[in-house]
Image (cartoon, helix red, strand yellow):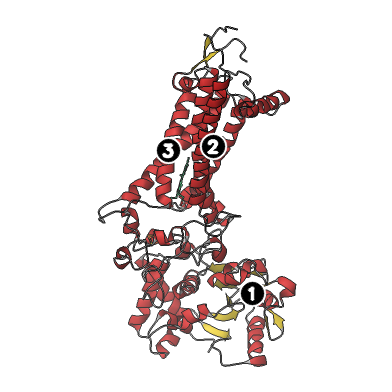
Amino acid sequence: MKEDKIFDALSKNGVSRRDFIKFCTAMAATMALPSSFIPKIADALEKKQKPILVWLEFQDCCGNTEALLRASKPTVAEIVLDILSVEYHETIMAAAGKQAEKSLMDVVKNHKGKYITVVEGSIPLKDGGVYCTIGGRTAVDIAREVCGNALATIAVGTCATYGGIPAANPNPTGAVGVKGAVSGINVINLPGCPVNVENITATVVHYLTFGALPTLDGLGRPYFAYGKRIHDNCERRAHFDAGQFVRKWGDEGHRLGWCLYEMGCKGPETYKNCPTVKYNEGTSWPVQAGHGCIGCAAPHFWDTMTPFYRRLPKPPGVSVEKTADKIGIGIAAAAAAGVAAHAIASAAKKKGKPEQETE
Amino acid sequence: MPQQRLRAYVWEFPVRLTHWINALCIVALSVTGYYIGNPFIHAISSDQYIMGWVRLIHFVAAYLFTVSFLLRIYWSIAGNKYANWKVFFPFNKKRLKQIAESVRFYMLISKKQSHMLGHSAIAGLTYLFIFLLFLVEIITGFVLYSQSHYGVTRTLMGGWLLDIISVQTIRLYHHLITWALIVFAVVHVYIAWFVDIHERNGIIGSIFGGYKFVTKDYE
Ligand code: HEM
Ligand code: SF4
């Protein structure tokens, strides 16, 4: 099995040449490469051996796995599973218990420095990491060993990248992303809740094609997928620039597909390629479905991007219903009133004792 | 006791120029900024470009404001003593005493504060604070603006800050400072008027023409 060439595996599973080239084209597009790269990608996938991959799940909801599996035929997701030799994945593997853990350790031992680790879910550090254990070992312990010996680690989903929802304030388990738990390793962050499968595949295909991992930004994210904001490629952007906004769920603008900015859309502050890759094999994505972006791919989005249905966060130390503008108007009005009171008081004082002024 | 009044050239042209550019920019930036945060006018047709124009005006005014701010900083070194940076740091004993004196004056407790040709100590301190707000507003503004830029431009605009501080926090402070500047504008105009009538020193006229009128005991 492990010696399989990628294209052979694909054709064995009934993927036609045409589908294969379609897939290579989609990958080139996702990586923002010109079409001249399609043969190069096809060539690499035909000749290279299936990379070995282990998929670790820690404090997660399985959403990224779901995103990976939720697909129709013949699909990118299916191809992903075919181009990769997945040696360990708790949700989809047949092995269980000790046997499963052994297969994981076999990979670490036999393919040291050559396999890819995918991590889904955050890693708790508080109290020695006891809040997430698998087979009696803590998540952080497993991650240190498995990620530490891997060629590279792909952190998928916002939990594995930045801690995500488990790390939301007050973060009871001390959850962090892979980078926060294991230092000194190669990590590619693919945040999102869930991740877009195309971005995982494209990262792997990039490695297979160029023999190198994609270029990453300051937050460890590949530029091809996280270089632009949702807002920059949004299909509703023309309505934003025109000044046509949804103001209430179900109003006329909402039915006409206007911009969701006033409904709290965080597309203008979220870096991701959702508008182009979308979800479920390009079927749709939140803004297309009529809901604003909640910034799920942003670090600590549960704390920083809330309230989801308002553009601005709450001013710190202020009760729930006060917005920055209500406070601002209040203070400006108070200043105006103060000024008026001062003018009256000084006029009244003056009247009492006329001042002598001469030129 | 009758006093003699003198006419003195206080505010040089660059001071007056940057003052009025700042004033106009703050009005334009507050109105357009408020619209960006809360688009109160809606388009009736997709052919319109309301948010587009509003943002363009905000960004053009933002550059103008930034240049004006930098020019004023330059003039705090190159200009006359009334424009000098030292007037914005009234932290020696004498100046602190004058601040206390001014507070009593503005609270209508006393009827006199030391006459000053340039900024009084309390005014200098206030403007130090306001210039800091300008600076934070400019920095947060450019960091927000960096989001629609790439590569080196983005880094130069401060985009790297977004890896450290949440963009929403930056946006919130950009927004709150707007209100702080509006409050300042209200109080600032009122105090100018108040001082003008109480001291008869032509302070309001001075920011147009540059001259103030002073009694002999000025500093
Ligand atoms: C006196 C100075 C300024 C005032 C009063 C001001 C005011 C505002 C306000 C109220 C907002 C709306 C914030 C929100 O709720 O989203 C805003 C947005 C913004 N401002 Fe300013 N601003 C000023 C200077 C600047 C400067 C110097 C820049 C630099 C380029 C700038 C760039 C921006 C950007 C990029 C946005 C967000 C626009 C968007 O999201 O489309 N501002 N400003
Ligand atoms: S819906 Fe959101 S992302 Fe799309 S244009 Fe409007 S604000 Fe931007």
Nearer the viewer's eye, disc 3 or disc 2?
2
Residue A191, given in percent of the width and then of the height, sits at 52, 68
Of all residues shown, which one is farthest toward the right?
A128
Mark 2 residue crowding within 10 angstroms, few (<14) / some (14–19) / many (20+): few
Which residue is disc 3 drawn over? Answer: B27
Disc number placed over residue A338 in the picture, else none: 2
Q: Residues within 10 Å of mark 3 (few under 14, many from 20)?
A: some
**Residue B109 has which mark?**
none
Q: Tell me how many marks there are.
A: 3
Along the horizontal axis of the image, is A313 left or right of A233?
right
- Crowding near the residue tagged with mark 1, few <14, some 14–19, many ≥20 C-alpha atoms within 10 Å: many
Chain where mark 3 sits: B
* Mark 1 or mark 2: whose residue is earlier in sequence: 1
Label 1 element class:
helix
What kind of element bears circle 3? helix
Tell if the residue under mark 3 belongs to the same chain as the one under mark 2.
no
Which residue is denoted by mark 1 in the rendering? A147
Q: Nearer the viewer, mark 3 or mark 1?
A: 3
Left or right placement of residue A182 versus residue A325 in this view:
right
Q: Considering only vertical position in the picture, is A107 above or below A32?
A: below
Place of residue A160 in the rendered image (x, y in percent of width and height, measured from the top left): 58, 72
Circle 1 or circle 2, nearest the eye: 2
